[in-house]
Image: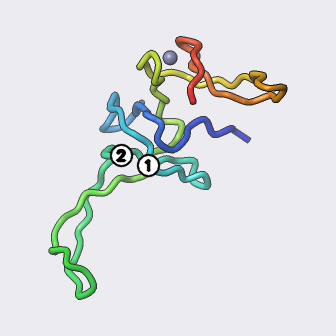
Amino acid sequence: MKSFRVRKNDKVMVCTGKDVGKIGKILRILKKKNAVIVEKLNMAKRHTKKNQYSNNESGIVEKEMPIDVSNVMVVCGVCGKPTRVGYRYVESGGEKKKVRFCKKCNEAME
Ligand SMILES: [Zn+2]
């Protein structure tokens, strides 16, 4: 099984589709779909109807649609470049800890 290399609140760049090259923050991870919801990216318009349970006016709202995780790249918080994420083990206090690192600048990404 493919490991999931992205996390909530990661910055990612979209690699394909109409938002290609745009960067956003991951709001949700949909593990079953192997997809992520990225803030303000892959927006789709939805028509809403006014109903008695909400004060919202009827109209069109834009909503983030899932993006396949293979179509995004994590943007490194250290070097600011879209990158591949690697894993390595570091020892701290006698414990081995798995940390993510940026394959571009080699810095740990936590
Ligand atoms: Zn980096």
Q: Is residue 17 above or below residue 79?
A: below
Q: Position of residue 42 (x, y in %)?
A: 34, 46
* Residue 14: quadrant of the picture: top left
Q: Residue at x 43, y 34 (%)?
A: 11
Earlier in the chain: of badge 2 and badge 1, it is 1
* Amino acid type, label 1: Leu
Closer to us: 90 or 45: 90
Residue, disc 2: 39
| Mark 2 → mark 1, Cα distance in angstroms | 6 Å
Q: Residue furthest right?
A: 94
- Left of 76 or right of it: where is 52? left
Q: Dot 2 lies on which element?
A: loop
**Quarter in which the C terminus is drawn:** top right
User: Residue at the spot x=76%, y=24% of the render?
Assistant: 92
Quarter of the N terminus within the rendering = top right
Q: Position of residue 84 (x, y in %)?
A: 56, 23
Residue 50: % across, % down: 20, 80
Q: Is residue 23 above or below residue 86?
A: below
Q: Residues within 10 Å of mark 2 (few under 14, many from 20)?
A: some
| Residue 78 position (above or below residue 54) | above
Which residue type does callout 2 highlight?
A: Glu
Residue at (39% x, 53% y) in the render: 65
Q: Is residue 90 left or right of residue 45?
A: right
Are the residues flagged by discs 2 and 1 in contact, CB closer than 8 Å? yes
Picture quarter containing residue 20? Answer: top left
Q: Which mark is residue 1?
A: none
For this view, does 30 lie left or right of residue 87? Answer: left
Q: Given the current orientation, which residue lies at the most extreme top position?
A: 105
Secondary structure under tag 1 reads: strand
The percent coordinates of residue 59 (x first, y second) are: 16, 69
Q: Which residue is mark 1?
A: 27
